[in-house]
Amino acid sequence: MIRKLLFILPAFIFVNSAFAQSGKSSIQIKGSDTMVNLGQAWAEAFNKKNPVVNIAVTGGGSGTGIAALIAGTADIAECSRTMKEKEIDKAKQNGITPVEFTVALDGLAVVVHPDNPVSKLTIDELFDIFTGRITNWNQLGGKDLPIVILSREVNSGTHVYFKEHVLRKGNEKGTEEFSPMALLMPSSQAIADEVSQNPNAIGYYGMGYISKQQKVVAVAKDRNSPYIEPTIENVKNGKYPISRPLLMYTKGEPKGAVKEFLDFALSSEGQEIVIKTDFVPVK
């Protein structure tokens, strides 16, 4: 791993040589903003047990992490969506075979301002809102106010998942897109901040970002189904309709410090951290 880093990033020869001489190793983790806090929590706990391993965790979106993995500049890509075939093919062209690990589960929370009287929506209503077919809250039993749509940017795995499973309803050949009026936000925290201060806004993010500053909307598959909130239990038992796996991709079968880190993330201690960061454990 050190030789590869020396070849790709000659500017860091001195730093990496220092790690080698001191017996240290490093792990670069990049990707999903949904997972960045979880990844940092894992890194902090892992580092207490393994102080000789230097771990850097950064966000930027699932697409950013995948691009870094393909380029060989990340050891682990954190992703809130699966890699696309064309991304896997591109990685293989670079001599990298991505290996996928499901490390946690998540429910995408739909949120509005706490003063908004709307507290439940169906998937069809979410479709109508985010494609721009419904434009005023009074069409949904709310106040006579225009709806402000907030979405993650297109590089976000959360954006892709919401589009594929809410707008396109799982249809791989679907062409539905977000309304051109949707405001594309750079992070999940940006959506949370905007919703907390904008009475007209509606947005979505991973349930790890839920706070009292936003109101979570219960979601139903259709009008004949129960309205379900994104809780750990509801995601775990499959009742919440907008649930997904959270993934890590490695460059081939993990070895050394990368394997130790993944083993820790999937251990009982690592999965306890998943719960503490408001996601759902896989074990």
Image (cartoon, helix red, strand yellow):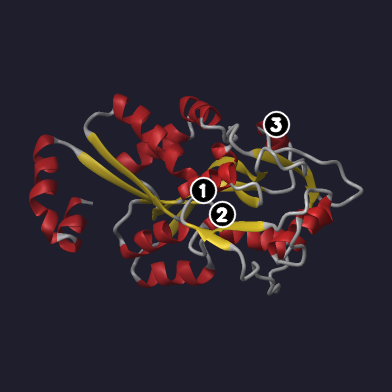
Q: Which residue is the site of mark 1? A: 188
Cβ–Cβ under 8 Å for marks 3 and 1:
no
In the image, residue 162 lies at what x, y percent?
A: 64, 57
Cβ–Cβ under 8 Å for marks 2 and 3:
no
Which callout, 2 or 3, points at the residue further toward the start of the chain? 2
Answer left or right for 112 relative to 80: right
Q: Which residue is the site of mark 3? A: 233
Quadrant of the image for the C terminus? top right
Q: Residues under labels 2 and 3: Cα distance?
A: 21 Å
In this rendering, the answer to whether 48 lies above or below 263 is above
In the image, residue 126 lies at what x, y percent?
A: 74, 56
Cβ–Cβ under 8 Å for marks 2 and 1:
yes
Which callout, 3 or 1, points at the residue further toward the start of the chain? 1
Q: Residues under labels 2 and 1: Cα distance?
A: 9 Å
In the image, residue 217 lies at what x, y percent?
A: 72, 42
**Which three-letter amino acid code belongs to the residue tagged 3?**
Glu
Q: Which residue is the site of mark 2? A: 158
The residue located at (70%, 31%) in the rendering is 233
Which callout, 2 or 1, points at the residue further toward the start of the chain? 2
User: Which mark is nearer the camera, 2 or 1?
Assistant: 1
The residue located at (46%, 66%) in the rendering is 88
Dot 1 alpha-carbon crowd within 10 angstroms: few under 14, some 14 to 19, many 20 or more: many
Answer left or right for 227 relative to 72: right
**Which three-letter amino acid code belongs to the residue tagged 2?**
Thr
In the image, residue 207 lies at what x, y percent?
A: 60, 40
Q: Residues under labels 3 and 1: Cα distance?
A: 22 Å
Answer left or right for 158 relative to 98: right
